Image (cartoon, rainbow, N blue to C red):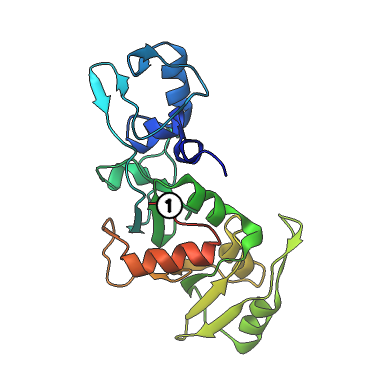
Amino acid sequence: MGNSDDREKTRLNKYLAQCGVCSRRDADKLIASGKVLVNGKTATVGQSVSDTDSVQVGKKVFGKVQKKVVLACYKPVGVTCTERDAHAERKITDIIKYPARVTYAGRLDKDSEGLILMTNDGDLIEAMMRGANGHEREYLVKVNKEITSVFLSQIEQGVYLQELETTTKPCEVTQVGKYTFRIVLTQGLNRQIRRMCKAFGYRVQSLKRVRVMNILVGDLKPGAYRELSEQECAELYERAGIERKT
């Protein structure tokens, strides 16, 4: 049997990120500069800590690693999914003020709105960002001219995107109104829906993500967020194919 202490240890840079001190990259810089102490001794880059260790940055001492949390957030139009882009007018981290440091699990482009999941669980982020996993994402799309059955059929079967030199996977498409349709994707190519519509002479006027796997945007308002319920989290982790560690 393995040592239980080994399983419970966390890389120090990840620990500091979970505590909301800074990003992992910046944490490594802090550690390298000798500004982080573990149990009163100067920490080293690559070091790991457990719940029983005392971690100090400046005058602030941190206790155990914060519990994992997942938020359902409504990203408004005009907000960029980034943490470090100095040119972004409004970043997702500017509008989500949560006690723990969380980051996005899957992007949503600046001109789009709707559901985005944010978490402090790096394993969940990695699992959800992996395109090969085929996780469902549902969108409500409004275009600039009347929708035809031929257009919907072509979108559903897969579209060759010349700019990306690839063909999209078959997907589920349902007409909602004269100019509006729902689409369920299992891949996340850059500006995929906008490119698919453009290939047939349509221009997207509004794009809202309403679901990510089992999580719905529901009645969240732009800029608002909520913590997932225990049941939602359990199903999300199961669908993501990873073990949930609290």
How crowded pointer 1 is (Cα within 10 Å; few <14, some 14-19, many 20+) is rated as: few
Q: 171 and 29: which one is in front? A: 29
Q: 99 and 9: which one is in front? A: 9
**Residue at position x 53%, y 62% from top?**
240
In which quadrant of the rendered view does residue 151 lie?
Answer: bottom right
In which quadrant of the rendered view does residue 75 lie?
Answer: bottom left
Q: Is residue 100 above or below residue 160?
A: above
Where's residue 184, x and y in %? 54, 74
Quadrant where the N terminus sits is top right
Q: Which residue is mark 1?
A: 245
Residue type, numbered disc 1:
Lys
Q: Is residue 194 left or right of residue 110?
A: right
Q: Is residue 180 visible?
A: yes
| Callout count | 1
Q: 18 and 146: which one is in front? A: 18
Q: Is residue 209 visible?
A: no
